Amino acid sequence: MVLFEFNNSVVSEVERNAFQKLVRSAFAQRRKVLRTSLVKQGLLSSEEAEKIWTALQLSSTARAEELSVEQFVRLLQTLN
């Protein structure tokens, strides 16, 4: 079980719902590659995922539990 406590300096109030949706989606399929999981859930296309992962310098095999909070924030900002 993972508990996230929001720190106002991490995401703005406006981004909070989107951040929660992203994190919930990321952890929805346990032990799956994050990029594949988000594509299957329709949050982005394969092409978009490839560009984003390259821009953020994320491993193509990264799993949700391997990303830091800051990486999730950068991912959210890139998706928006």
Image (cartoon, helix red, strand yellow):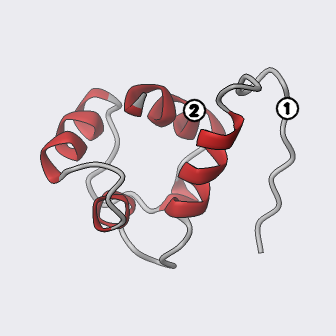
Q: x%, y% of residue 15? A: 65, 30
- Give 47 or 65, whichever is nearer the viewer: 47
Which residue, as the protein is rendered here, is positioned at the far left? 47
Numbered badge on residue 26: none
Amino acid on which the number 1 mark rests in the picture: Asn
Give SS at disc 1: loop
> In whole angstroms, how far apart are the C-alphas of marks 2 and 1?
12 Å
Q: Which residue is mark 2?
A: 73
- At x 77%, y 26%, the residue is 13
Q: Are marks 2 and 1 in contact (CB under 8 Å)?
A: no
**In the rendered image of this protein, does residue 50 appear above or below residue 24?**
above
- At x 60%, y 61%, the residue is 24
Amino acid on which the number 2 mark rests in the picture: Val
Give SS at disc 2: helix
- Give 40 or 30, whichever is nearer the viewer: 40
Q: x%, y% of residue 64? A: 51, 60
Q: Estimate how packed mark 2 is, as few (under 14), some (14 to 19) or many (20 or more) residues with alpha carbons within 10 Å.
A: some
Picture mark count: 2
Which of disc 1 and disc 2 is earlier in sequence? 1
- At x 73%, y 22%, the residue is 12
In the picture, the quarter occupied by the N terminus is bottom right
Image-based side of 72 in relation to 75, left or right: right
Q: x%, y% of residue 66? A: 53, 56
Image-based side of 23 in relation to 35, left or right: right
- At x 19%, y 35%, the residue is 51
Q: x%, y% of residue 3? A: 83, 61
Q: Estimate how packed mark 1 is, as few (under 14), some (14 to 19) or many (20 or more) residues with alpha carbons within 10 Å.
A: few
Q: In which image quadrant can residue 52 be found?
A: top left
In the picture, the quarter occupied by the C terminus is top left
Q: Which residue is mark 1?
A: 7
